[in-house]
Structures are given as C-alpha cells and as structure tokens.
Image (cartoon, rainbow, N blue to C red):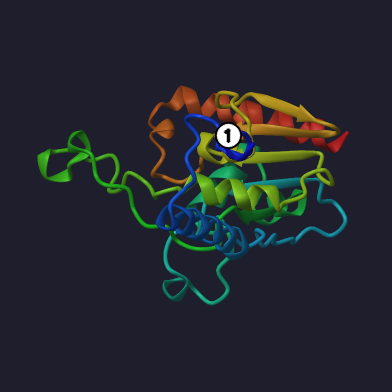
C-alpha cells in the first residue's frame, strides 16, 4: 500500500523538479522582462495640425542623446522632414498640418558598427554613418502602446519600424488594418542608401502623394 502510494505521487519520467538556482533564475528573468515592459514608454506624439490631421509619421528613435538635442527639438526635424515635404510637394509647415509625428523609441540606442565596404578611409563617400541600432524587442513593446486606429494613414519609416508593428510588406507597399492604411516608407534621412538612386526618389514621391490623396478623401 505504501509503495503504491509512493508510485502514484512520483514525478513523471523526464520531468525533474527544477533546482533552487534554476527556479531563482526563471523568477529573475520574469521580473527583468516585466521591468523592461514598464520601462518602455508610450511614444510621444507631436501634433501641429489644426483640425486637418489624418495621418501619423513614425520614425525609429532620436538622432542622439537627449542632452545633445536642441531644446525645441521634434521628431524628424531637419533634413528628414525637409525631404518628406519635398516629396509631397508641400512646405514643411504644410506637411505637418496633415501628419502627426513620433519616434517609436524615446531614447537614443547608439550607432551601428561601421561595415568595411562603407569605410570612409577606403574611399567611400556617400554616407558617414550606417544608421542607429534598433532594439526590436523594445520597439515592439512601444508599438503595442500606440493607438493607430484614429489615423487614416500611418507612414512607417523603414522596414524595422514596420516589423515592430508586425508588417512585413516591402517598401512603398501598404497594409490595411480596419480604416487605417500602413505605408512602409524608406526613412527620409541621408543615412538611408535608398536615396542614392534617383529612380527610388521618384517612386517614393509618387507613393507619398498617392497616400496623401487617399488620406484626404
């Protein structure tokens, strides 16, 4: 009787009870993940439109540490917004009347390691940077906190930002979710190699103007 009871309480083969160090490690991992989720802030959306806004432009992250940025700095300020406005055939001020703007990450994650084929010392002259690091796990957490349903159109700048929202479409293609169109758009900064080809610029301009027309309907 005692042996039968012991057998009935025995742990199934192959399922050993985790040791105390293993159990502690799992607990610490769970706590670390929960802390990371809490630490990721909801993207701060900047709105300059006066009742016309129907779209949102989403970049990756600030171009540098917060202390290095001008006091009145806004996401995509400078050459990036100038390129977007030029592609749309609008002034910068007019462009932001139609779109809100934000970065997925609120902090600067740092530069990518420079690849050998883009080494300036070896004669490469097109770019001085290969772009910034983009921690996808934290980007996905930030994306989950952002409500896109109130917008008719959302420009996801770069395939990395698109992946953070679960969009796997190639550049200049759209995915529709409810009443919102998500357009995967090349990042407008000079770091993007996409803009090296004038034909790409023409394609991007055509796609952006088409999106603006669709958004205004």
Screen quadrant of the N terminus: top right
Q: Name the residue under label 1.
A: 7
Q: Nearer the viewer, residue 125 or 19?
A: 19
Expressed as whole percent of the image width and height from the top left, the position of residue 10 reads 56, 37
Q: How crowded is mark 1: few (under 14 residues within 10 Å), some or many (20 or more)?
A: few
Q: Residue furthest left?
A: 122
Residue 19 place in picture, x, y as percent: 43, 52
- Left/right placement of residue 209 relative to residue 65 reads right
- What residue is shown at x 45% (from left), y 48% (from top)? 134
In which quadrant of the rendered image does the C terminus lie?
top right
Which residue shows up at 52% across the image and 46% down it? 137
Give the left or right position of residue 84, taking residue 22 as reference.
Answer: right
The correct choice, above or below, for 163 with respect to 46 in the image is above
Residue at far front of view: 1
Q: Residue 15, percent across and down?
A: 50, 35
Image coordinates of residue 160 in percent, x first then y, are: 51, 38
82 above or below 175?
Answer: below
Residue occupying image coordinates x 17% and y 44%: 120
Between residues 1 and 36, which one lies in front from this camera angle?
1
Secondary element at image label 1: helix
26 to 1, vertically: above or below: below
Comparing 143 with 190, the one in front is 143
Query: Between 59 and 138, which is closer to the camera in this rendering?
Result: 138
The residue shown at (74%, 61%) is 48
Say how many tags the image has: 1
């Amino acid at each position: 009787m005692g042996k039968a009871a012991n057998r009935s309480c025995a742990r199934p083969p192959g399922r050993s009870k985790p040791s105390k160090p293993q159990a502690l490690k799992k607990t610490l991992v769970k706590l670390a993940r929960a802390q990371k989720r809490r630490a990721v802030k909801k993207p701060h959306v900047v709105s300059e439109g006066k009742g016309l806004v129907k779209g949102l432009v989403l970049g990756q992250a600030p171009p540098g540490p917060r202390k290095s940025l001008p006091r009145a700095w806004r996401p995509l300020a400078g050459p990036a917004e100038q390129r977007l406005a030029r592609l749309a055939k609008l002034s910068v001020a007019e462009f932001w009347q139609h779109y809100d703007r934000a970065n997925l990450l609120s902090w600067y994650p740092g530069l990518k390691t420079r690849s050998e084929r883009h080494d300036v010392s070896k004669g490469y002259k097109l770019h001085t940077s290969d772009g910034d690091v983009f921690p996808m796990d934290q980007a996905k957490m930030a994306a989950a906190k952002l409500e896109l349903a109130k917008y008719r159109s959302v420009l996801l700048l770069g395939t990395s930002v698109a992946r953070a929202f679960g969009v796997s479409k190639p550049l200049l293609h759209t995915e529709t979710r409810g009443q919102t169109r998500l357009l995967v758009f090349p990042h407008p900064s000079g770091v993007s190699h996409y803009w090296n080809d004038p034909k790409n610029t023409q394609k991007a301009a055509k796609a952006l103007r088409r999106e603006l027309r669709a958004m205004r309907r």
